[in-house]
Image (spheres, rainbow, N blue to C red):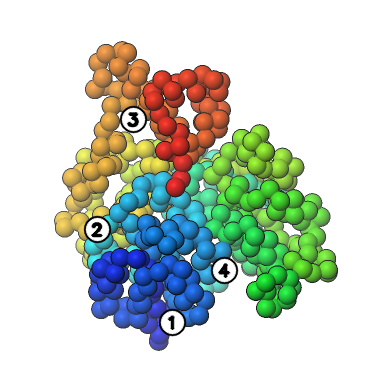
């Protein structure tokens, strides 16, 4: 993060010169040290050579796509915030970008006020001291979430491993931070690794470290995250993305605490508590041969499942008002949602969960011309999806014919089921309580294409 004396250095990457220049023009009055780059591969080299504080990229580029650029940047160990801006994305693209390590995601056209507000948020200095989790994901009146809160308090006092399950954006990282903050280890290090953001050939070194000369480019010894965590907490986010070969090495550490740096002979001992999280159905991954059953049982000592936001619609107004109170402060005026706007927010399925709701409210708080945000200011796509007959499975009042209502229900149910499981029909069928063959027949009947629900 930039210091109070040095201006923030921002790198803007896109192969369309006009876009780069427009973004630089937006940023220059506040962030004069903005560099533009027309080649993502050259941007990677620049990041190796110069210290930048933030990266802005687009999704579609000829030389290297934005998602692949995020993978490469995170894979090389850069921790700077990354903002993706695109006019070609979808909810799944936003989810995938966040999963790979993007800090924020904006759709074109980008208003200067919104972009600057997002950057100010990313440049806010972190609080000193230990982890102090933001309470956003822990605000709820839902009974299922109250059980989650009770579990956090119960497991925080122990040293048991915890596996946190839930879709992207439900707050798995915040729950892990809350467990650490309330544990006897709270004064020890908190270390996190996003297993999806680091290529497998580099993830081993990231976790266990390496000795000088262990491989090409290993110019000096590197301490891994297990060593860095000491007697604190190591959080393995998106552990379901870890390659099968590396899973066996992680299993060894969980069994006896022992590991070796890459290229090293000395056996080291880990004393860290491991908390893992995933948005994947690990049972389905085991059946498919992509995840080790013995590793699953080592991680799955205690599990906490976070319900998606669509299953607790009563929390939507609560969270929306909370976020609006926070982001409305920059407008120096109290802001509220109209009853009609809250009605539409509750009807929407929220594939990106709490994170998607937060980003939407921030955008509305920055761009709304009035103190009351009405339904007309919500994205057209959101109102369209929320208003589709059968898209809200509890609201089919607009369909009078029984057979039409049944078809609408089935199609909406299948679409949301496939979206939740990113096109994995086996996992979707299991959650739905249907035989695979029965589920597959329904998908074919409604001419749905599961591949369209997979992250791109």
Which badge, 3 or 1, is on the more N-terminal residue? 1
Viewer-proximal residue among 448 and 132: 448
Question: Alpha carbon of mark 3 to alpha carbon of mark 1: how far?
Answer: 48 Å
The extreme top residue here reads: 402
Kindly identify which residue carries mark 4: 77
**Marking on residue 3:** 1
Viewer-proximal residue among 18 and 401: 18
* In this rendering, the label closer to the viewer, 4 or 1: 4
* In this rendering, the label closer to the viewer, 4 or 3: 4
Q: Residue at x 23, y 51 (%)?
A: 336
Q: Are marks 4 and 3 in contact (CB under 8 Å)?
A: no
Question: Alpha carbon of mark 4 to alpha carbon of mark 1: how far?
Answer: 21 Å
Look at the picture and state if 166 lies above or below 256.
above
Task: Provide the secondary structure element on which disc 1 rests.
Answer: loop
Question: x, y percentage for residue 396?
Answer: 30, 23
Question: x, y percentage for residue 418?
Answer: 45, 33
Question: x, y percentage for residue 2?
Answer: 43, 79
The extreme left residue here reads: 370
**In the visual, does 278 lie left or right of 42?**
right
Kindly identify which residue carries mark 3: 392
Task: Provide the secondary structure element on which disc 2 rests.
Answer: loop
Which badge, 4 or 1, is on the more N-terminal residue? 1
Crowdedness of circle 4 by 10 Å Cα count: few (<14), some, many (20+)?
few
* In this rendering, the label closer to the viewer, 2 or 3: 2
Look at the picture and state if 206 lies above or below 141.
below
Q: Are marks 2 and 1 in contact (CB under 8 Å)?
A: no
Kindly identify which residue carries mark 2: 109
Q: Which quarter of the figure has residue 447?
A: top left
Q: Residue at x 67, y 72 (%)?
A: 216
Task: Provide the secondary structure element on which disc 4 rests.
Answer: loop
**In the visual, does 228 lie left or right of 51?**
right
Question: Alpha carbon of mark 2 to alpha carbon of mark 4: how far?
Answer: 31 Å
């Amino acid at each position: 993060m930039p210091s109070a004396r040095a201006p923030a250095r921002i790198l803007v990457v896109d192969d369309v010169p006009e876009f780069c220049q427009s973004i630089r023009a937006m940023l220059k009055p506040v962030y004069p040290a903005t560099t533009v780059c027309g080649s993502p591969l050259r941007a990677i080299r620049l990041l190796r050579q110069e210290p930048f504080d933030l990266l802005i990229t687009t999704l579609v580029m000829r030389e290297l796509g934005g998602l692949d650029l995020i993978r490469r940047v995170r894979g090389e160990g850069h921790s700077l915030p990354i903002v993706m801006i695109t006019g070609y994305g979808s909810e799944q693209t936003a989810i995938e970008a966040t999963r790979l390590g993007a800090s924020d995601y904006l759709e074109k056209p980008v208003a200067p006020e919104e972009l600057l507000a997002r950057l100010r948020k990313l440049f806010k200095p972190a609080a000193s001291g230990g982890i102090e989790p933001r309470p956003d994901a822990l605000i709820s009146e839902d009974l299922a979430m109250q059980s989650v809160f009770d579990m956090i308090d119960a497991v925080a006092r122990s040293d048991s491993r915890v596996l946190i399950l839930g879709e992207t954006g439900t707050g798995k990282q915040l729950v892990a931070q809350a467990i650490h903050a309330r544990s006897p280890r709270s004064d020890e290090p908190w270390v996190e690794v996003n297993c999806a953001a680091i290529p497998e050939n580099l993830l081993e070194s990231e976790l266990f470290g390496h000795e000088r000369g262990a491989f090409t480019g290993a110019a000096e010894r590197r301490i891994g995250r297990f060593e860095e965590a000491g007697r604190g907490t190591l959080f393995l986010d998106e552990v379901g993305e870890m390659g099968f070969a590396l899973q066996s090495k992680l299993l060894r550490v969980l069994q006896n605490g022992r590991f070796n740096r890459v290229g090293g002979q000395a056996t080291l001992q880990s004393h860290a508590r491991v908390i893992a999280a995933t948005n994947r159905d690990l049972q389905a991954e085991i059946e498919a041969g992509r995840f080790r059953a013995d590793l699953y049982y080592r991680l799955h000592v205690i599990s906490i499942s976070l319900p998606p936001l669509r299953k607790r619609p009563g929390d939507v107004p609560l969270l929306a008002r909370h976020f609006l109170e926070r982001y409305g402060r920059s407008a120096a005026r109290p802001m509220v949602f109209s009853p009609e706007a809250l009605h539409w927010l509750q009807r929407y399925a929220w594939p990106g969960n709490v994170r998607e709701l937060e980003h939407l409210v921030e955008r509305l708080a920055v761009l709304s011309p009035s103190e009351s945000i009405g339904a007309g200011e919500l994205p057209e796509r959101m109102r369209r999806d929320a208003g589709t007959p059968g898209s809200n499975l509890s609201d089919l009042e607009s369909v009078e014919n029984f057979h039409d209502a049944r078809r609408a229900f089935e199609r909406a149910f299948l679409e949301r089921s496939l979206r939740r499981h990113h096109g994995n029909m086996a996992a979707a069928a299991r959650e739905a309580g249907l035989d695979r063959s029965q589920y597959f027949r329904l998908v074919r009947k409604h001419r749905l294409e599961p591949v369209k629900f997979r992250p791109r």
